[in-house]
Image (cartoon, rainbow, N blue to C red):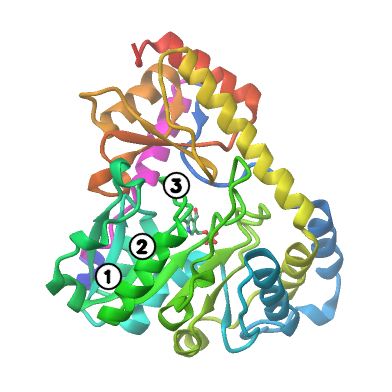
Amino acid sequence: MLNIANRMNSVKTLIFSELNNYKKRKQQEGMEMIDLSIGSPDQPPPSFVIESLAADVKDPAQYGYTISGIDAFHHAVSSYYQERFNVKVDPHKEVIQLMGSQDGIVHLPLVFCNPGDIILVPDPGYTAYESGVHIAEAEGYPMPLLEENGFLPDLSKIPEDIAKKAKMMILNFPGNPIPALATKQFFTEVVAFAKKYNIIVAHDFAYSELIFDQKQPVSFLSIEGAKDVGVEFNSLSKSFNMAGTRIGFLCGNEEVIQLFQRLKSHVDYGIFEPIQRAAVKALTQGQNFLKQNAKLYERRRDFLINGLANIGWKIKPSEATMFIWAKIPAGKQSLSFTYELMDKAGVVVTPGIAFGEHGEGYVRIALVQDEKTLLKVIERIEKSGIIA
Ligand SMILES: Cc1ncc(COP(=O)(O)O)c(C=O)c1O
């Protein structure tokens, strides 16, 4: 019998592995399964990024530790933020490289939270926020994202004693699992709230480039005073389909960045240089690709939403991201509905409850298959009679 640390009691196996095991069982039984559960891009990075990587892996000089990242990467992030979001960040003092934004999301609470401290988290929210809370032995306080509030947290509903005890607030717009956008007005309220209660805001902007219908991304850091209270995560995983070549960054408040840098210097020794160089190319030469990539998801969104509407499943169109947040028929539970979809239609989605209590009543559908496969999904759901 191994003696495990107490913190592991709250670090649970994620529902994704359970769903994956069930999917494999179904496949072994001979059922063809279509997986729309994980947000892993099915498309490759731009070809100039692959070519850059392929050339650089042949360079023997690029195999050393890179510690906190090459200069060119820091400068590329800084100019990308200026050009894309009209935000100034100092390439060295206000940018830190990450092995994917997940690296920062789960480690940042270790810098600011003692056991029992409160972190305000979106509910439903991306599962890594809860992971970071647990690893730091902090307590997550859920901020419900409700349709009637445009899926924005209602800050006035956070009790005064909780706000006073909170060390951090995590936000994510456009969000996973809820593909909604924030408004400048909401972010302005967040800045005021964070200043009042001395809370660090960490905004996850991993989907900053997957925005539809000509809407514009709003960087939290573009709001006046935001850099006094907060930082923003970003990543090349979804923007440039580089999920496997792990690279992302955190930028914003200098003090937060410098403290996090101190922790990171004990955790890893940097990212493989060819990946950094490829990321520089993506960030500085990828504007056309970004437009095409967003269009691809927008087309898939329209295809699936229209197809499902035709068979009686009406879903609010996503404003952004690679996900659809679909309300399920009244009276059904998201987990049992997910298993029913696997059993009767051979389609794998993620139950809303996996993202928090307020995710109940919904499932998340990832647009990670082409339209031919999405057509099969629509036909199978229709045939299964689940929606009727
Ligand atoms: C909202 C959100 N943030 C962060 C991540 C982590 O991405 P990465 O670590 O690849 O940057 C994901 C991945 O799915 C995500 O959905």
In the image, what residue type sits under mark 2? Tyr
The residue sitting at 44% across, 16% down in the picture is: 381
Asked whether disc 3 touches disc 2, contact meaning CB atoms under 8 Å apart, the reply is no
Looking at the rendered image, the disc whose residue lies closer to the viewer, 3 or 2, is 3
Lower sequence index among marks 3 and 1: 1
Whole-percent x and y of residue 364? 41, 38
What amino acid does circle 1 point to? Answer: Ile
Magenta includes 355? no
Left/right of residue 190 with respect to residue 79 in the rendered view: left
User: Circle 1 sits on which residue?
Assistant: 119
Q: Which residue is mark 3?
A: 180
Q: Check the picture and name the quadrant holding the N terminus.
A: bottom left
For image coordinates 53% across by 60% down, the residue present is: 218
Q: Secondary structure at mark 2?
A: helix
Q: Residues within 10 Å of mark 1 (few under 14, many from 20)?
A: many
- The residue stretch that appears in magenta: 9-31
Give yes or no for contact between labels 3 and 1 (Cβ–Cβ under 8 Å): no
Specify whether tag 1 is near ligand 1 (CB below 8 Å): no
Q: Residue at x 58, y 28 (%)?
A: 302
Q: Which residue in the structure is indicated by mark 2? A: 129
Amino acid type, residue under disc 3 in the picture: Ala
